[in-house]
Amino acid sequence: MPRRTASPLLRCASLLVLAGPVLAEPAPSPSPTPPRPAPVAARPGGSGALAAGPRVAAALLAEETVSQGAWKKLEWLTDRIGNRISGSPAADRAVAWAVRTMAAEGADAARAEPVLVPRWVRGEGSVEVTAPTTRPLAFLALGGSVGTDAYGMSGPVVAVSSLEELHAKGGEVAGSVVLIDKPIVPNGGEKDGYGAGSKLRYYGPPEAAKLGAVGMVIRSLGTSSMRLPHTGGTGYEDGVARIPAAAISAEDADLLARLLASGDRVEACIRLTSRTLADVWSANAVGELRGRERPDEIVVVGGHLDSWDVGQGAIDDGAGVVVAMETLRLLRALDLRPRRTVRAVLFMNEENGLRGGEAYARDHAAELAHHVAAIESDSGGARPIGFYLDAGAGASERFLELLQPLSGTGVAHLLGKDDTGADLSPLAQSGIPRLGLRQDMTHYFDWHHTEADTLDKITRDELALNAVAMAYAAWALAEDAEPLARAVPLPVLTPVPRKGSR
């Protein structure tokens, strides 16, 4: 007699019941590992971090190589929770998991600090060519885009490569679907890289709407051709019509360009069900290892816990999240309790609002004068190549001295001061020395903001090096006798959309 099985519907329902109480899941249990190196106890007093630096760096590398603590956390975050746009149930599960895990791994304190965040829902839809042929295009709605009615927004396609060219088109834009077609290249900088493209994506819809456009599509801000659309944040202006906006794959942007070059009238239609709901409460996840001598002085390490609602959020920014968490675990496991407190802050809502960074600066305003440094990692999980540093006179030279024990890893370099991390930008007004741990980004924008941002894009050994670099830098800055010189506080400026408003 054939064995009876539950219907597919019942099987799915039972799985949903089993998967439901994610907030109650235990932190991931470490797998059995070989014996670890003996703890490296920090010696009280002394002249600073220089003398103990080589011994500490070696111990951190040995411990992380054996334990693979960062990888285990990233595997859990990506495979068990997945993408986690701010305001979503997945983002809530990520906060609960992170707080629980930091507590289980020995943090002296672990908590969720409330943040009111936007709630945007992608929905469904289509982008298609309707003349001179019919063809669906590979697309993703841009974060924050408005939706359309069931019929969508249709019009002739007008292609530009810059906002200046858009304005030069003038009356041609009225009633059109604007295509912003500007390829970006790896490490292209502000002219041809992601920085240039993100400005077009953010400001494109309102500028097109001012000229009467009914919709906008942009060539995806990616550096490979896999018919893979890349999402990212866009913006609107008060008093300006809000038009639907989407990214299309590089191949489909080329298709539109070829059709336009033929001289035929090219038309397109955008249909989206995207919508923005009321703000909801979420949180930054915070854990800390209290300093042994100056616990009120703080070194922050962090990444952003939210991601876009596609892929797994592994490179952006699961990797940054777990190396910050692993910093606390490594220092605790090796009994490396520095003079000052090391605080891990996993920021919420970097991708579509920067509310977490702003909330942290606001809620901790009374203690910012006692923050001696802040480090963020938000450029993937590939091989670490150095740090950005924005600090006062003499800080670069001192930090390079402190980094020398890491010279064998290739990370003992300063790369500039202009990209220390979007979540840290609200701290700039306090003059806190801000650092950004930077990775090799050759392939970062191949997968950034796509369905392909998954765990397989990261290797265990390279992630381990990132964890060691972050942990060592945090220990050295928290242990050194004198903090780095503070940067000159900046005036209050109107925020410019950067990586956190994308």
Image: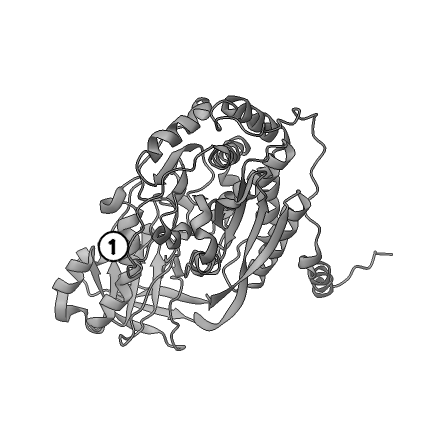
Tell me the residue at 49%/40% (across/down). Answer: 457
Residue 180 position in % (x across, y down): 25, 58
Residue 125 place in picture, x, y as percent: 43, 67
Q: Residue at x 58, y 55 (%)?
A: 94
Q: Is residue 132 visible?
A: no
Q: Is residue 433 above or below residue 450?
A: above
Vertical comparison of 179 with 487: above or below: below
Is label 1 in a helix, a strand or a loop? loop
- Please indicate, yes or no, whether residue 104 appears anywhere in the rendered image: yes
Residue 395 lies in quadrant: top left
Foreground of the two, 278 or 13: 278
> Where does the C terminus fall, quadrant-wise?
bottom left
Q: Residues within 10 Å of mark 1 (few under 14, many from 20)?
A: many
Identify the coloring: one colour
Of residues 269 and 15, which is closer to you in this image? 15
Percent coordinates x, y for residue 104 in the rendering: 68, 46
Of 19 and 54, the residue lying toward us: 54
Residue at the farthest right position: 1
- Label 1 is placed on what type of residue? Asp
> How many callouts does the rendering have?
1
Image position of 426 (left or right of 116): left
Where is residue 176 shown, x and y percent of the image?
23, 70
* Residue on which the image places disc 1: 181
Give the position of the N terminus as an image quadrant.
bottom right
Position of 25 with respect to 237 (left or right) is right
**365 over 381 or under it: above or below:** below
Asked whether 189 or 159 is in front, the reply is 189
